[in-house]
Image (cartoon, rainbow, N blue to C red):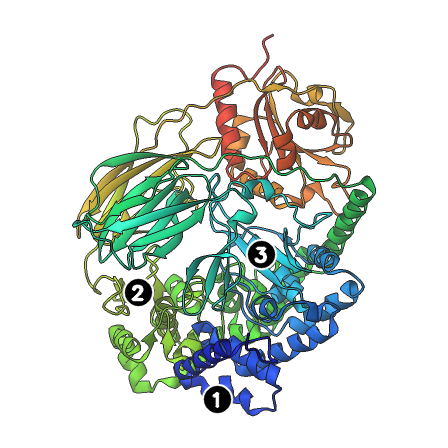
Amino acid sequence: MNLQTSVFSLDIAELERIERKFREKQQIAEARARELFDVFQEELTEEESWALKFLFAYMPLNDLADYDGALFLSHVRRTLDIRGKVPWGHRVPDHLFLHFVLPYRVNTENIEDSRGLLYNELADRTAHLSMAEAIMETNYWCHEKATYTGSDMRTISPLTMLRSARGRCGEESTLAVAALRSIGIPARQVYTPRWAHSDDNHAWVEAWADGDWHYIGACEPEPRLDQGWFTPPARRAMLIHTRIMANYSGPEAITHEEDSFTEINLLDRYAPTRTVSVIVKDEQNRPVIGADVYFELYNYAELFPLAEITTNDQGEASFKTGFGDLVIRAVKAGRWGETISTAEDIERIEIVLDQTKQPEGTADVDLVPPPERGGDIVEPIDEERIQRHNTRIEEGTKIRTDFEMTFIDEQRATELARAVGLPSNRVWEVLRKARGNDREIAAFLQERCGEFGEWPLRLLESLNGKDLLDTFRPALDDHLIGSMTLFGDLAEDTFVRYVLCPRVSFEMIVPYKRFFQSVFTSEEAALFRAEPAVLARRLKTEISQMENMPNLKGRGNPVGTFKLRKADLMSLYILFVAVCRSLGIPARLHPSEQKPQYMENGQWRNAILADNSGAIQPENQENGNLLLLMDAKTAAGTPAASYSGNFTIARLENGVYNTLAYPHGKSDVYDEPFELEPGSYRLTTGIRLKDGTVRARLAYFTVRAGEQTAVTLTYRESDVEVPVLGVLERNENFRVQDGPDRTIGDITGASGAIIAWIEPEREPTKHLLRELRELAEPFTEVGAPLFLAVGDSEWSASFDPNGYPGLPSNVHFVRDSTYDGLSTYLSSNQAAGEAGFPHLFVLDGLDQIRFVASGYRIGTGKEVLQIVTALQQRNEWRSQE
């Protein structure tokens, strides 16, 4: 007999587990007991009480620190009320409701009481629909509200997405999951943490309807479920997963499980899979229990750990993955072993922990991703449905564009600047980045510039661009007013960057300066200013270190961390820097090491906050230098050095290489030495071939205190192949902007050209346009005409060719009403047709196709430059007269 209760179909064992974990969280959060748990003194129904306990039982540490119980009670009551109102509310099994509807958190976003607001937006639009139709309608609504743009790692909240109207894929999917849950539909954010065949990653959404999970591209609707531009790339993935804040026991394979969350592996829903089995042994051939096994692939020029799995009692670890190559590294107590697993491996892999030091010299490795694969044959969508979908897309784009037109424009920004006596170009730059939060930022300038002059603007300029979307006047006032008495004899740049600026890492910006100025006595503050190391020792003693969910480390706000008296190590680092800045002590996280430092006598000193298990150098230990040398034998076509683009530096710590966090794309790498802690390092370089294979080189070196180590930055040779792939018909007509119709032959002339058919609203095209902007100078230098062809359905009233600043000067937008030339090519190339837009062709002077790229492909811009350069060097760019 299955013993159940009437509450969420939970049996006695599950109720006891929730109760036990809830009591544990009460003990952990005893310093904030009133703020968090007084809500249980209210009159609660049995469902409300257990739903609250469930959330608290699995709540991340930072949420216990940063939010109050009233927020969670409001969320629970609204969610239960919605479940009773939506037509499918009680068709959703309790198990799915608890794990995929009730949760308030999707990713690392700031938590706001948004469920009721989202429900009010969607309830009437979806009430008459089936669950499957409601999922699609919700995604059309998301498309009306937001579109893709690249940005930093901090995840903005759904309400901030609505205010700003754009975000990266992790933020689009956070919005879509929150929206679906707001109408009682189970939903989860799905990630491929890194692609194997291309740099970058991607996130989308799975939603449940009447017994089945379906996927959608968040904010990118399709005319049916289980369709998206990312479908072909997903068939080449090595891991697709989602994380659940609970001890989840569903049917999916579990990749990793800890006390507070479960990571489930969804790869076999998208791609062919294999299971890699590893046994770890010591030098006496005995199984090693509790070794950490890292399954790594090449991405962003590092060996990125897709999964970390601990060996069981037999010394074994297994990982379900795709048919591509992995570097597998096993580590325990500083001893390690490493091997490569290829797609052909079917036997169990044995790794011996027989290494304590890194190798010497260099090692060349080829890493092959899963091959391109065709998909299942699906029934074609009828033309009427496609037309209806296209109309919805155009309508949604116009709704969003009309909303963006309400943002403060440059003229109004100039008027504001004139009124407050500030430079108009700087004020416009800040307000432009603030988007839908522009009036809040404008009001701050209007209210504070009279008293503080330029300093309010200097504060805003010290923030990351994304901060301007969700930082409000209470926080801005706190950091402005709380900082202005701290200037002292600091250099102006030091004061702005390391005292005035509130941003430390990726935490939410909150008021904290006046709080920390009030909690310490004047004597304590004076002591900390004289000896910041004393503050570090005090925080290390008084704040207990507890590791959090992996994706939430370092997200605690300083005030919450201080009040809870418990934190993961990175949140403790953020707290130290915030307290220092509040007391006028310049402080930061080291730019590459991400460890806390304070300034003393003009020098940066390390703050010792890690416990004995954390690796951090002593305060005054001397660093060494790494001087990168340019390879004098660099072959033609070798890419220019770009950090995270084609090389990274990683330090060996306890048997694991940790990549240093220099700015993505950093290219001035030969100008001055890198200051590094003493230790063993690995320099990873890589060149990615067209099929996604990487030719990697691993160079090992040692940095010693007070010494400079010189290492030549080398890449493996990669011949640029430029075969003739076909001919593109010259007679297709394009309508040139503000000009007559012209054929492909007209626009290419006697020389070659680059032609890309694009969908401006889709993420793959936006990646291509971003790459063209980043490579504007080299594209202009090669002089190749570059035509971006837009179809009639995309060339709508909301599309403005002038709205893409920063592209190479030789870019021309053209309108293609027929797609004749493209259709001819796609009809003979099923894979390209399925991959979707953009479709990019490099043509030589004879209209011969010398390069083709379709769909989502990070790095296409660099490939095109290599191809065009090679053709020009071989005199094959112009036709033979």
Amino acid bearing label 1: Arg
Q: Is residue 744 above or below residue 243?
A: above
Farthest-out residue, right: 384
Q: Which mark is residue 597?
A: 2
Q: Residue at x 80, y 40 (%)?
A: 382
Rate crowding at label 2 as few (under 14), some (14 to 19) or many (20 or more) other CA atoms within 10 Å: many
Q: Of marks 3 and 1, which one's residue comes earlier in the chain?
A: 1
Q: CA distance from mark 3 to mark 1?
A: 43 Å
Name the residue type under label 3: Glu
Q: Is residue 579 left or right of residue 434?
A: left
Q: Secondary structure at mark 3?
A: helix
Residue 835 versus residue 73 in the image, above or below: above
Identify the residue position indicated by label 3 in the image: 429
Q: Position of residue 338 (x, y in %)?
A: 28, 44
Indicate which label's residue lies in the foreground, 1 or 2: 1
Q: Amino acid at mark 2?
A: Gln
